Amino acid sequence: MKTLLEMSGVSVSFDGFKAINNLSFRIGEPELRAIIGPNGAGKTTFMDIITGKTRPDEGTVIYGEKSISLLKMSESQIAMAGVGRKFQKPTVFEAQTVRENLAMALKNKRGPFDVLLYRKTRRGAERIEELAEIIGLTDALPRVAGELSHGQKQWLEIGMLLAQDPRLLLVDEPAAGMTPAEREHTTDLLKRAAEKHAVVVVEHDMEFIRRLDCRVTVLCEGSVLAEGSLDHVTSNPEVIEVYLGR
Amino acid sequence: MLRALFLALALILGLCLPASRAVAQDAGQDLQAILQTHAEEVASPGRRSVGTVIDALTASGLPGVPLFLERWADRSVYQRSGDGLFYYAEKQGNEYALSDIATGEAAGTAPASEMTEIRPNGGVRRVIGTALVQFQLSDPDIARRTAALDAISRSPEADQLEPLRNSIEGETDAGLLARKERLVGMLAARYGDTQEARIAAIEALSDAIAVDVRAVLNQILTTRPGVAAELPEGANIARTLTPGDDLTEAEAYAQLVEAGLAPAAQTPAQIKAALTDNIDGGSVGGVPIGQLATEAGRDRAYAALADAGTVPARVTEDDVETALASHVFYEEYTESDSAITDAAREALDEIETRVALNQALDLGLDALSLASIYFLAAIGLAITFGVMGVINMAHGEFIMMGAYTGYVVQQIIPDYTLSLIVALPLAFAVTFGAGVAMERLVIRWLYHRPLETLLATFGISIALQQLAKNIFGTQARPLTSPSWLDGAWVINDVVSIANIRIAIFVLALIFLGLILFVLNKTRLGLEVRAVTQNPGMAASMGINPDKINMLTFGLGSGIAGIAGVAIGLYAKVTSEMGADYIVQSFMTVVVGGVGNVWGTLAGAGLIGILQKGIEFFNPSNTLAAQTYMILFIILFIQFRPKGIVALKGRAAGD
Amino acid sequence: MTRTFLTQNRSVFWFLLALGIFALIVTVLSEAAGNGMISTSFVKTLGKTLCLMLVAVAMDVVWGYTGILSLGHMAFFGLGGYMIGMWLMYARTEIIVTESLLAAAIPPTPQEIHDSIGTQIFGVVGSSEFPAVWIFAHSFWLQIAMVVLVPGLLALVFGWLAFRSRVTGVYLSILTQAMTLALSLYLFQNESGLRGNNGLSGLQNLPGLDDVPQATLSIAFFWASAVALGLGYVLFAWVTSGKFGSVIRGIRDNESRVRFLGYHVEGYKLFVFTLTGIVAGIAGALYYPQAGIINPNEIAPIASIYLAVWVAIGGRGRLYGAALGAAFVSLLSSWFTSGAVPSVPLGFYTIQWTDWWLVLLGVSFVAVTLLAPKGIGGLFDLVTTRHPVPERIGDFGPDKGARRTVEGEEEK
């Protein structure tokens, strides 16, 4: 298992408030990793830094075999380098059909002229059908995404993430608003993706994490509090203190 | 005939009785006698001869002399043909009412036919005027002394120096004394007797700044262009000029031609005319007319004509160049003494440095006043745009509304001071109401749809503009400022600022303080900030966001109304005045940084300084200044996209 | 491909059909066809309207599809007009000048002709020198290239600066407005070399075509405008359909999400901004020969705002809506301002529509924004069963999640 992403000594503060404090983090490929932590622990900011939305005050973020620094890249370049993100709140393009949403996410050339001259291919169509099958939205393909239920939007978002075929998947609260059966399905999906790629899951739901059965990183006040198996971290007194002590 | 006889008699009397004349002079009381002595010169004065009369009059020291000189120049002195005596006379019907020259008392009347008006010509009047100056300079009436000084500073002459210098001693008024000394200095610099005196005077001038002092120095430094084969010996050369750098080659050659040092060059039009004159059966100088459509063809034809001697030889570019190379072009001081011109140059340089500093100060004041106008125009916008995230394209029309409110109030209350006192709060009330109405009717439905708010408020803006046009017409309406706001605060000849601008500056300061106070120290401000940051949370804490939004919008609009009154006082009130300020106001808010009063202040300051700065470099073209300013702002946004004062952190964004 | 394209975009077919039929009817009824039911001046008005429709369609792509409320597209339109106007003025003056100089005893040199043209054109601003911007004015083809290049380059440079610094939303609108203002102020100066506030005039007289009656010319221009509108419509329908359309609509609705999908959002915006800027320039180049005169007032920010009004009233996010809005409002506007509309006596006051039209327009514009955001185009949804434009949830313009330069979001 080789390292895909390495963050070291990253700090970021907003008006004096340290959202991330000297955070170091490493994930290999393939690997499945869960991140837990109380509200305000910096989970979302952590993802923002990787995807280029937030620039840290200090520290380094190194990615891939060529050890490129993500800090100098724009959001779109980072995404093209193979970092995919599913947002906490489902943000699909509500005015467009499910098929258009998926087609947009499909791994292809992204330049304006490439897209303008893009012609639908059979392979692309097949891939969309395949993804729709996986996320259970085959019937909903011609429907407008805005009409979908919250859970379906979550699925569509996951589908778009898969369509990008990223090497590093950042998944923010995938299970929110899903039925138990759907959660199970999600777990399977993530596990399957983690067979080839690096997957980081941020989740509050301990049951869900337990089912993922992977290494867990506990974030608190912007830095890593504990790391290890779920049982290992949940027996850590500091973690108990953070979660239950107050 | 009779008159001539008497004249001759008087003349003989005057010449034959030197003793009696001396007695009269010694008695020091009879002006008439002196005049009689010089009766010929007085009655028909010439530029040369008038000097002796004036000298005699001045020497007499009689009190009536200044008045006489004045009247003399004014053509109200008459000579009676009967006895040759001089009188002041005033025409009354067919007669003249006479008054005695020495005493001014009435001296009966005389028929018009007996009185001859004495008409000194322009040159003589000037001489008389100069002579008068020294009397006026010492006149007991301060107004007349001032007038005399004004006259001298308007047209300084060499012969004024002495009288002026003499009058200093008796001067009692401190202000006038200073002016006199200053004028003496300036006159001495130009017309002083010796080189040393002039240089001393010039050096004394070097710590002044006034326009007239600079004019004096520039006059000393006047140059005339010259051209010669070699620099003339002994001339006071200001500088030599290189054709091509200091003056164009064409100008230089024209100078040579004018000085008769080179033959005139033919212009293309002259060549063409020469060719036209020499058309000879379809060809010119053997060149067919058809070939004259090119420069080369014309050259050949002209050369042929020149060879034949029909036209003067062509001055070629080579000729021009040789001529230019073999001559020097220079500027020569009209003042021949180089020590004086050097001193003047040095003094002028020193003054100009000081003038530049003062100009910078003046520019700073101008910029400050422009900045306060922008601040007033933009601060209301900053509140609605920055605090509420609502863009109000009709903001400019609120400014206009405020200005028209001021105009209407002035129609009702004629007293300008009182009407201004009424207009300011009324303008606030009117635009506050308009703002609240607009918020309730339109903007409320469009929160979080910024582009649509922009368009809807734009619709309101065109409707309001046209409405104002329909009500008040298209021509500009005056909003007159009270008299105590007229005039300017003049610091020196370079630095001054109009009172109205000071008032606007003060108004801007008051509003800055007021807004800071409202936003930071009052309950309303607290609630506004709460609603801005988290409307949901604010609502759950008992704050009514609807009410707060309404009030904030009203406040922003109300300030626009007050800004309208201020701008109306300074510019004209038209239906389009709002549109003139709206883009600048947006720029102010954007450059300053959104949601921050200090940011708006910084933005207004930057834009004011910038605009004045650009105007300074290109004063004739305010359009260009605005163009460049906008370009600068577009580039500025590149480097500080969030403005000068940017809020940071999560609280600021989402 | 065209077949699938047309079948997928039924509005294109109907639009082209309607445009063709309309053009034929106008031609048949025009004075050029000897019928004269439509006066030449009205044919010109219709031709100009077609150009306005074209720029409105372009505006719709920028605003309705990509979410950039540009207040600068009428500036590109005006620039296109200036570019063609330069050639028209130069070429026509050249013909006149050459004729008058040929009458002289000696034939003129090229330099003399050039100087004379300069005196003729720039005498009005007290100059006779040709400014540098007229360097290509003698050549029709070079100047035609300028019609495309000048607005295109301006859009490219300005767009690059603006999008690069991630200015979005109302900020971008104000910035484009500032650009427009700067351009018009610049053109107002005599030093700009484009005759200051006199502008360029006499553009309706085509050089060398003095013998052709205006009736014929007006129909020719009408057809050229119709063809340009048709081509522009097809171009933009093609651009906005398919994946590209999907991406730009994504940018409109959620810019940052598109960015996280790996699309270089700035590149797309720049592409759309520049392409529409060029089309606006072409539309202007067809408009001003029909209008006959162009001056810097035409470029003032208000013109671009009216363009936004047309598109909004017509209905954003559908090309035919924008085209109809432009036609409807601009024709209505010229009808109202011509004084042909009977005034309304209220007893105490008589409403003269020449005075009150702008008030009516402003108020109805507010009403459309508040009550009928889909505009005139929305009416078509009533007759078609299909929803050509899906209901959009949320705001037009960038969403809160977009990384904006507004309100000082956290960014280092």
Image (cartoon, coloured by chain):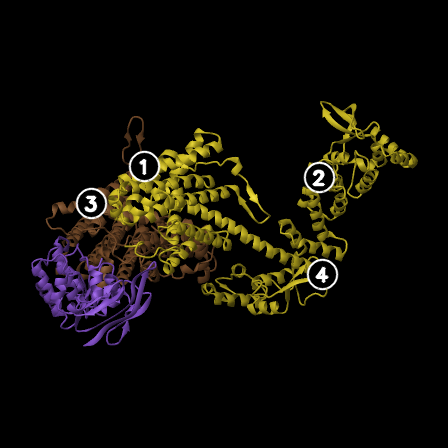
Indicate whether C308 appears above or below B249: above
Question: Which chain is home to disc 3?
Answer: C
Residue B127: x %, y % from top left: 75, 42
Q: Which residue is label 1 attached to?
A: C354
Q: Which comes sooner in the sequence, label 1 or label 3?
A: 1
Q: Gap between marks 1 and 3, in whole Å? A: 24 Å
Q: Gap between marks 4 and 3, in whole Å? A: 85 Å
Kind of residue at disc 1: Thr
The chain that appears purple in the image is A
What colour do you see for chain B? yellow
Quarter of the figure with residue C29:
top left
Judging depth in this view, the residue of B149 and B438 nearest the camera is B438
Q: Gap between marks 4 and 2, in whole Å? A: 35 Å
Question: Which chain is home to disc 4?
Answer: B
Q: Are marks 4 and 3 on the same chain?
A: no
Q: Secondary structure at mark 2?
A: helix
Q: Secondary structure at mark 1?
A: helix
Q: Which mark, residue B339?
A: 4
Q: Are marks 4 and 2 in contact (CB under 8 Å)?
A: no
Judging depth in this view, the residue of B42 and B321 nearest the camera is B42
Quadrant, the C terminus of chain C: bottom left
Q: Is residue C121 visible?
A: yes
Quadrant, the N terminus of chain C: bottom left
